[in-house]
Amino acid sequence: MNSQDRPEIPLALTYDDVLLMPRRSGIASRKDVDTSTWLTRKLRLASPILAANMDTVCESRLARAMARCGGLGIIHRFMTIEDEAAEVSRVKRPEVGATPRLHTIQPQRSIADATKLLGRHNIHSLLVVGDDERLLGILTSRDLLFSENSGVKVADLMTGGGNLVTAPVGTTLDEAKRILHERRLEKLPLVDAEGRLRGLITSRDVLRVAENPNAARDSQGRLLVGAAIGAVGDYMERAEALVAAEADVLVVDIAHGHSEHALRATRRVKERFPGVELIAGNVATPEGALDLIEAGADAVKVGVGPGAACSTRIVTGVGVPQLTAVLDCVRVAAERGVPVCADGGIRFAGDITKALAAGASTVMIGSLFAATEESPGQTVVRRGARYKVFRGMASAGAAEARARREESQDVLDELAANVVAEGVEAVVPYRGSVTELMHQLAGGLRSGMSYLNAPSIEALRRNARFVRITVAGLRESSPHDLELAE
Ligand code: XMP
């Protein structure tokens, strides 16, 4: 190749290479900005932050906490199909509407039995059901107040018949709230078409939901959750089980999302489950984003190699610095109304502001969340300090764990001989509750938005003016020339 043939190599940038220029702003307080955003073509979230589908990051405990903060957790797929579906169900388990244990009593039992039951469970009401689970009435401690004859039957004192107010299964929280208010009730039993007891919404449930007004919830008040399915092997069976478990969004996630099998998996899953919102990735080029969108993706996950535990770029020489990858993919995705998720490489709240200013609608985070109390990673103590284990999903340890799960000695032997890891295993300093971390991240984002006079994520994108900085600029950006206090 002579020098005239030399291809021009474009410059690609990442978060640390840039800063956002401030603007004249009329936003007086961080509270005055709205961080709500599109997760997919149809789903909206109050917070643009997702927890990564990694086995040291996101299972049901973290996913519940994320959704309560307005974000979303994606359950990882490095477990059996049944286990992943069970994790989804744990998040979908109604916080309202179907109390895990409904306290019931038969109508022929005595009020002495009812009094004992109420005391034993420290509750104030019992649902009265017949042998066929049919709901017959409700008995509250108030009904028992001045009853002196303990031989009286439950059926004699309960509220039943035409006075019993019920609602069908699937009643939304708003509908329940209206009925509870209009009828001045504290409890609203949910019944199926045959009148069998199926759940209960209480006024306390409604209040609890009101405490977390920004939580990510479905129309029935249950928390939202996503689940990963991969693109080869059992992904279709997995998708089926996860849809049955009522996952709100599926994620076709593989390292090279611009591969024929990722495109095929995206197309097949979308054809089979047209009503299910589907995120697909990972890609780092506009062609990759476009092909996934044409295959049916409702959102595209962008990021090849930016993650904290990734070594893909070092091992393979392939990847695109994340800010450029996001800017390029957004260019084609935005025209088609498809949101982009910037996945990996978020180290500080300011990186979230930069990713969203570059056009991403959400960010996905692994290492920061791996450090929280709610992540499934093991806790270890080193030199008196607490850490949590964190590993890349293409690390040798993660690959070995997968082989062990499948109980395949052949796979283990082959791995021992051939593994080429594209991720590392590490520990991250323990950071306490994810709720506090989400508060810090969201606070940084809100503040960044107010510097740019951006009351919304859309305005942030419009108002963004990036400047490239030098190594000296980066050095200046962090606290420097100080003896930091302990
Ligand atoms: P952060 O930086 O938030 O990034 O920890 C999380 C994202 O990293 C990706 N990931 C990997 N990439 N090898 C890689 O090249 C790996 O072993 C690996 N494990 C996770 C993934 O996209 C995740 O969301």
Image (cartoon, rainbow, N blue to C red):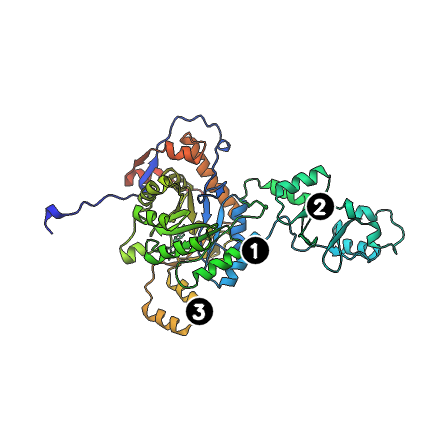
What amino acid does circle 2 point to? Lys
Secondary structure of the residue carrying tag 3 is: helix
Residue depth check, mark 3 versus mark 2: number of the one nearer the observer? 2
Residue 198 locus on image (x, y percent): 67, 53
For disc 2, the marked residue is 187
Callout 1: few (<14), some (14-19), or many (20+) C-alpha neighbours within 10 Å?
Answer: some
Residue 214 lies, with reference to residue 261, above or below; the image says above
Residue 48 lies, with reference to residue 80, above or below; the image says above
Q: Mark 2 near ligand 1 (CB under 8 Å)?
A: no
Secondary structure of the residue carrying tag 2 is: strand
For disc 3, the marked residue is 404
- The tally of labels here is 3
Secondary structure of the residue carrying tag 1 is: helix
Labels 3 & 1 near each other (Cβ < 8 A): no
Labels 2 & 1 near each other (Cβ < 8 A): no
- Nearer the observer, 200 or 401: 200
Residue 292 locus on image (x, y percent): 36, 50
Q: Real-space Cα distance between discs 3 and 1? A: 25 Å
Q: Residue at x 88, y 56 (%)?
A: 151
Question: Which numbered dot is residue 90?
Answer: 1
Sequence order check: which comes first, mark 3 or mark 2? 2
What amino acid does circle 1 point to? Arg
Q: Real-space Cα distance between discs 3 and 2? A: 48 Å
What amino acid does circle 3 point to? Arg
